[in-house]
Image (tube, grey):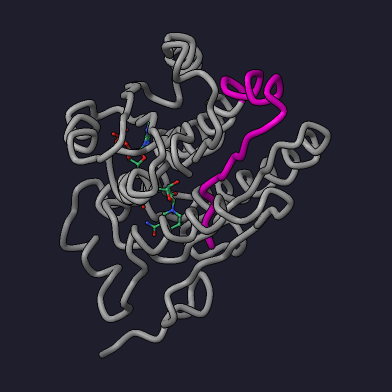
């Protein structure tokens, strides 16, 4: 991992933040992406290796391509892309969910991830090496009530991952996805639009995964030998059986 150049989208919080910390401890140089510049600066100051900050909204196609275009030459040969940026917006049935929430999820979790991938691919293909790790979810394996569009976005990430692996097979680039169950991050606060009480209930009595648990999974996937690809990794809290069955402590 030493001196590898690693792009992490959504590094300003949760899984992305923890992944940046883990990779930095292992000697990686990090390109930290997100919309909240202040958070990225705070993270950058805490890392023991070099980092470069890119601030853009993954939904903004031009901003994504412009951001990677501006990378200084010494940052251009990216070894690993961790496509982590994404969120759920709302938890509602189709009948009452808002179109704005749907747009945020489809445009961010799906199209945004595709734009970032497309922006970084030419160099990886030229170098005939690289590893792309996409953040899917258990929601991309099973559909749960009131999650139709978030689940759709993560099923799309799963399909895109599989398709990309086929397309890049001849180029020696690894393509993988990690699919966590419940992880305690800002995720539920964003989903419930800042309602902290409702967000806290999601994690009650379940001993959710920590962002570091997921970061450890990603680190494992990116450290196996060159001839091995951990293509798909589902990571659940022990108390969670699937997307909707959990054994919560009373
Ligand atoms: P989080 O703490 O809310 O972090 C989400 C990150 O994504 C933030 O850094 C945010 O940065 C970034 N982001 C969101 N929308 C963006 C946009 N339009 N443009 C650029 N950056 C954007 O949540 P998390 O749990 O770490 O989530 C990370 C990933 O894991 C997501 O893809 C999520 O779907 C997936 N996941 C989470 C869970 C869970 O239970 N938490 C489970 C399975 C999968 P800015 O706000 O600074 O832009």
Q: Quadrant of residue 35?
A: top left
Foreground of the two, 20 or 196: 20
| Residue in the picture at 34% in, 59% down | 212
Q: Position of residue 215 (x, y in %)?
A: 41, 55
- Quadrant of picture, ligand 1: top left
Q: Which residues are magenta?
A: 118-138
Q: Residue at x 42, y 46 (%)?
A: 97
Q: Is residue 85 above or below residue 78?
A: below
Given residues 47 and 19, the one toward you in this image is 47
Whole-percent x and y of residue 108?
Answer: 46, 33
Quarter holding residue 100: top left
Q: Residue furthest right?
A: 170
Residue 13 horizontal/vertical position (percent): 28, 44
Which residue is at a point 47% across and 16% down the rendered structure image? 68
Residue 181 in the magenta stretch? The answer is no
Q: Which residue shows up at 63% across the image and 49% down it?
A: 176
Number of disc labels: 0
The magenta stretch spans residue 125: yes
Please name whichever residue, 17 or 189, is drawn nearer the observer in this view of the structure. Answer: 17
Q: Is residue 87 left or right of residue 188?
A: right
- Image spot of residue 14 (x, y percent): 30, 50
Residue 231 is left or right of residue 90, and the answer is right
Q: Quadrant of the C terminus?
A: bottom left
């Amino acid at each position: 991992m030493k001196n590898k150049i690693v792009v992490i989208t959504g590094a300003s919080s949760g899984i992305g933040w923890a992944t940046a910390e883990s990779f930095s401890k292992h000697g990686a140089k990090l390109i930290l992406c997100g919309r909240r510049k202040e958070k990225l600066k705070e993270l950058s100051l805490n890392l023991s290796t070099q980092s470069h900050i890119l601030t853009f909204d993954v939904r903004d196609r031009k901003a994504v391509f412009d951001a990677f275009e501006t990378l200084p030459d010494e940052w251009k040969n990216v070894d690993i892309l961790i496509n982590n940026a994404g969120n759920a917006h709302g938890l509602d049935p189709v009948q009452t969910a808002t179109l704005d929430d749907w747009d945020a999820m489809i445009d961010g979790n799906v199209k945004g991830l595709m734009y970032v991938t497309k922006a970084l691919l030419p160099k990886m293909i030229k170098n005939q090496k690289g590893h792309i790790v996409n953040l899917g979810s258990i929601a991309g394996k099973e559909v749960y009530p009131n999650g139709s569009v978030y689940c759709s976005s993560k099923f799309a990430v799963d399909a895109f991952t599989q398709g990309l692996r086929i397309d890049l097979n001849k180029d020696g680039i690894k393509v993988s996805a990690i699919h966590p169950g419940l992880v305690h991050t800002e995720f539920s606060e964003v989903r419930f639009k800042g309602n902290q009480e409702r967000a806290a209930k999601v994690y009650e009595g379940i001993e959710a995964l920590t962002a570091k648990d997921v970061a450890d999974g990603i680190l494992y996937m990116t450290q196996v030998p060159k001839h091995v690809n951990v293509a798909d990794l589902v990571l659940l809290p022990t108390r969670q059986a699937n997307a909707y069955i959990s054994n919560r402590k009373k």
